[in-house]
Amino acid sequence: MKELEEKIFKTIMIGAAMMILGLLVYIVGTIFYKGLPALNWDMITKLPGGGFYLGKEGGVLNAIVGSVYIITGALAISLILSLPLVMYINFYLRKNSLFSGIIRFSFDILFGVPSIVYGAFGFTVMVYLGIRASLLGGILAVAMLIMPIMMRSLDEVTRLLSRDLPDALLSMGATRYEMVKVILRQLMPGVVTAILLAVGRGIGDAATVLFTAGYTDNIPAKLSQPAASLPLAIFFQLGSPVEEVQNRAYASAIILTGIIFVLSFSARYFSSKFSKNKI
């Protein structure tokens, strides 16, 4: 009976894995099948020309650069706020204290908030302050979106470390700066994983930047200027009645998928590298 149960659950797990793998292959295959013929060097290196959404010349360089700007700024803000907070609730508060429980519960709630809500909230605040749709607005909105993901991921990794580690390091004569360096070295694989999850959620989201970053055919030179993004470029191209432009949307999706793949493989590489250097 026990062997039968093991075979049944093994079959279910293999079936689930094959289903997920098949779905991934189908999605990526569809994108490449429809977008590869439309993908060319101009798509990556040129700004949209006149009549781009009517099938004329140009590319999506503005959206590529805008996405990189937005996700880079959002990651910087999220890391600056997330790391100190996670360190505080894990190494300075009592274990299982009420305050740390409230903070973790807040992480869970914010994690489940739809991205459109963050976009609408950011838009409301910007209207109240008289701020136009801009690169800064997009960065702040995406930072709010990915911050709960990063905080929750870092918190889970940090809770695996011993709470006695800081005291042990200080008792051995280490300074607080040296103590923080050692703890961060232990957390580095988790930090890389948190960044990967945050980038995957933030760089592919359209609802958040639709209200806050706006859209432009140019590359923003200031934080106060509107910024394009790849998800919105795909959305606008798919809405075109011109078949050639719709195919360009799939080509833009290939570019976005390629960026995510590069970031994923890089994160896995650095995560394994840092894991080997842990004490």
Image (tube, rainbow, N blue to C red):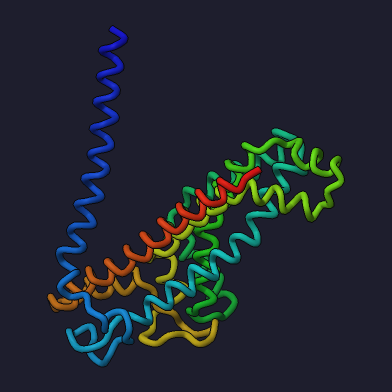
Residue in the picture at 17% in, 59% down? 30
Percent of width and height locating residue 146: 51, 58
From this view, report whether residue 147 is shown above or below residue 19: below
Q: Is residue 190 visible?
A: no
Residue in the picture at 62% in, 45% down? 278
Looking at the image, which residue sits at the far front? 276
Looking at the image, which residue sits at the far bottom? 50
Residue in the picture at 39% in, 62% down? 262
Instruction: Please state, as top left, top right, bottom left or bottom right, where the C terminus lies in the image.
Output: top right
**Horizontally, is 29 left or right of 84 in the view?**
left
Looking at the image, which residue sits at the far left? 243
**Horizontally, is 48 left or right of 38 in the view?**
right
The quarter holding residue 41 reads bottom left
Looking at the image, which residue sits at the far top? 1
Q: Is residue 94 visible?
A: yes
From this view, report whether residue 151 is shown above or below residue 261: above
Residue in the picture at 69% in, 47% down? 183
From this view, report whether residue 204 is shown above or below residue 171: below
Q: Nearer the viewer, residue 124 or 241?
A: 241
The quarter holding residue 205 reads bottom left
Percent of width and height locating residue 261: 36, 59
